[in-house]
Amino acid sequence: MKISLFIPCFVDQFYPQVGMNIVRVLERLGHAVDYPEAQTCCGQPAFNSGYWDEARAVAERQMTVFRDAETVVIASGSCGAMLKVFYPELFQGHPRESEARALAAKTFEFSDFLVNRLGVLDVGARFPGRATFHDGCHGLRELGLKNPPRQLLQHVRELELVEMQEAETCCGFGGTFAVKFPMISTAMGEVKCASIAETGADYVISNDSSCLMQIRGVLDRQGKSVKTLHLAEVLAQT
Amino acid sequence: MNAHAREFNEAARQQTADLVQRDWIQKALAGYYAKRDEFKNRFSNWQGARDTAAAIKWEAVNHLDRYLEEFASRLEARG
């Protein structure tokens, strides 16, 4: 299968290793991956802030860039939800609506792609350690991806996966939310980190780099040694 | 930033710094989630039940004039 990679802004700017590890995993499974370089942002920040015309302008570019892609794999639940769930909404009644729907239909978040599209649970990974998984809001609530990341992690050799009480609770980042309401965002992050600490896990894993950045920030302030990892970084280890 | 936003931010600053209250809320929420999960497990298709309930609400809200009249007349018919 020919896979086109959509790299979220956070991955592009701060966590490129997430993208590189996704490629590693997909190539290990025998697939060809390309990266259309003309891509930019999915348009979610503008969309969430009510600037739908601006969001559409950005989204239209992505629709053009990925028009000929066979399958699009995205490294986050957040951007994944934007393309899969919100592009059709954003382009309702617009001349390019069918294009938006077509892109939504062929786009998959990374774990969704592995489990539901490829039917793969064991990617041949090995990662010794005790870890817990954080459910990012978009991936969980918009894309319904509770199980795929856990199924993948359960097949990672030597990885001990424990559930935290507040796994599904929002980490407080919310993109612009953290900027507009920093004190609330921080309090939510602290609740999340307290739950992580309760598990005794050395690693917290998620499929959203934005959530991981938030959690990392709180953990660093608290001087905690728990490490944050994207799902792709764990699955790429052999 | 307008006056409301300023007020909100100040109140939020105070509230989020209150760790005693935060602890209390977390405990209350934990109890709520336990009860909620108990109820969820009684449904063989939880999401299906949610979708059905949402559809019923949507129908009711969009035809409230008719349903309210029907409700009132049926209630009155019972004495």
Image: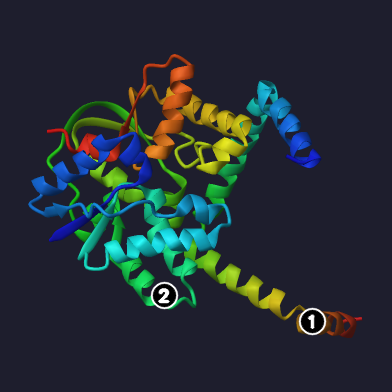
Amino acid on which the number 2 mark rests in the picture: Glu
Asked whether the beta carbons under mark 1 and mark 2 sit within 8 Å of each other, the answer is no
Q: How many marks?
A: 2
Numbered disc in front, either 1 or 2? 2
Marks 1 and 2, how far apart at CA? 35 Å
Q: Is A75 on the left or on the right of B50, as rendered?
A: left
| Residue A29 x %, y % | 10, 49
Q: Chain of mark 2?
A: A
**Secondary structure beneath disc 1?**
helix
Residue A59 lies in what quarter of the image?
Answer: bottom left
Residue A150: percent from left, percent from top: 30, 43
How was the colour assigned to the protein in this rendering?
Answer: rainbow
| Furthest-top residue in this view | A223
Q: Is residue B27 above or below residue B71?
A: above
Q: Residue at x 54, y 53 (%)?
A: A48
Q: How dense is the environment of label 1, judged by Cα within 10 Å: few (below 14), some, or many (20 and up)?
A: few
Q: Quadrant of residue A18?
A: top left
Residue tagged 2? A97
What residue is pinned by disc 1?
Answer: B65
Task: Classify mark 2: helix, strand or loop.
Answer: helix
Q: Which quadrant holds residue B66?
A: bottom right
The three-letter code of the residue at mark 1 reads Asp
In the displayed structure, A74 sits above or below B12; it is below
Q: Which quadrant holds the N terminus of chain A?
A: bottom left
Residue A198 appears in view: no
A235 horizontally vs B17: left or right: left
* Image location (x, y in percent) of residue A31: 10, 54
Q: Residues within 10 Å of mark 2 (few under 14, many from 20)?
A: some
Residue A188 in percent (x, y) is at 56, 33
